Image (cartoon, rainbow, N blue to C red):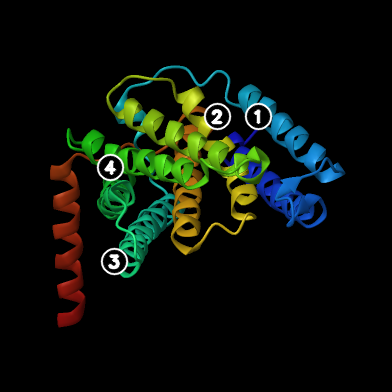
Amino acid sequence: MKKHILLPALAWVGGIAGFALRRWELNSAYDPVTRLMGVTLPGLLLPVLMAALAVTFVLGCRGMGRRGPADWFYAPSAGYAMAALAGGMVLLIAGGVSLWQVYTGGERKIMLLLASVLLVLGGAAAAAAARGIYRGLWSDGLPVLLMGPSFATLLWLVCIYQQHARQPEVQLYMWQLLSAVAMVLALYGYASLALDKGSAGRTCVYSLLAIALTPAALADSVGLSNTLVWLGGMVWLTAQSYMLLGAAFGPERPERMCPEQEEENETEQDKNLEDTEDE
């Protein structure tokens, strides 16, 4: 059973269904006069769907066992590299957009400014980490790089809470908070694995839950910068869950090359290319 493909795909399908249910709920249950939400069928189906997905993810991620960082952080797949790099770059762009909004807006919120700066740094760190993971080049700096998006999304979560703290109706923003919390837990769990701590199973569950919850959060029309953060996180967590599940349940991967071997191979490839051009 290809869990490393099926579970992330299920999270995406469940997320799309959650988006449709959330839009249905907002269109049928929200009263713009009282700014309150009524009880409707989609409002009942959405929590049931997410609960069912959560149970499925918990059962699907059982038995991942314990491995060392060098085993977890190796994904010789071009698909992983492209997804992880794209996720990191979208986070970086989200930070830049947020900085621009802070600069052009009338308010100067310190927490939002810090979160924006950290999103830029965290996105760049995530993109740099993706390269090392793809090529199997383990280094002591990888845990530091992976902490970047963790800290950035934590401050971003605080900003989301501050934005909605005065809302009288929790239903208006609860999926945003749940999605952001799951994303933060998934990113911190991922960074902890690089330090040979934490649980890969729990990290995968949080990652898959964040993927499934994100479309429901995006259905609330959350603004450009927040949309980019959620999309970047969703793409990154897809690559993250694919890599961890692939290490536990996927096919046997080729042996990683040490840096000296990789340098020799690159030199040999360059030499062959030069010989071909001379001919």
Marks 2 & 1, CB-CB < 8 Å contact: yes
Image coordinates of residue 273 in percent, x first then y, are: 20, 71
In what quadrant of the picture does the C terminus appear?
bottom left
Image point (40%, 59%), residue name = 90
SS of the residue under disc 4? helix
Mark 3, mark 2: which one is toward the viewer? 3
**Is residue 251 visible to the viewer in this orientation of the structure?**
no
Residue bearing mark 2: 205
SS of the residue under disc 1? helix
The circle drawn on residue 54 is: 1
Per the model, the C-alpha gap separating discs 2 and 4 is 21 Å
Residue bearing mark 3: 103
| Nearest to the observer: residue 108 or residue 133 | 108
* Left-right relation of 168 to 232: right
**Mark 4 or mark 3, which is nearer the start of the sequence?**
3
Per the model, the C-alpha gap separating discs 2 and 1 is 8 Å
Q: How many marks?
A: 4
**Mark 2 or mark 3, which is nearer the start of the sequence?**
3
**Mark 3 or mark 1, which is nearer the start of the sequence?**
1
172 shown above or below 56? below
Mark 3, mark 4: which one is toward the viewer? 3
Per the model, the C-alpha gap separating discs 1 and 3 is 39 Å
Image coordinates of residue 52 in percent, x first then y, are: 73, 30
Image point (18%, 57%), residue name = 266
Task: Indicate the amino acid at tag 3.
Answer: Tyr
Per the model, the C-alpha gap separating discs 1 and 4 is 27 Å
Mark 2, mark 4: which one is toward the viewer? 4
Marks 1 & 4, CB-CB < 8 Å contact: no
The circle drawn on residue 148 is: 4
Image coordinates of residue 195 in percent, x first then y, are: 27, 24
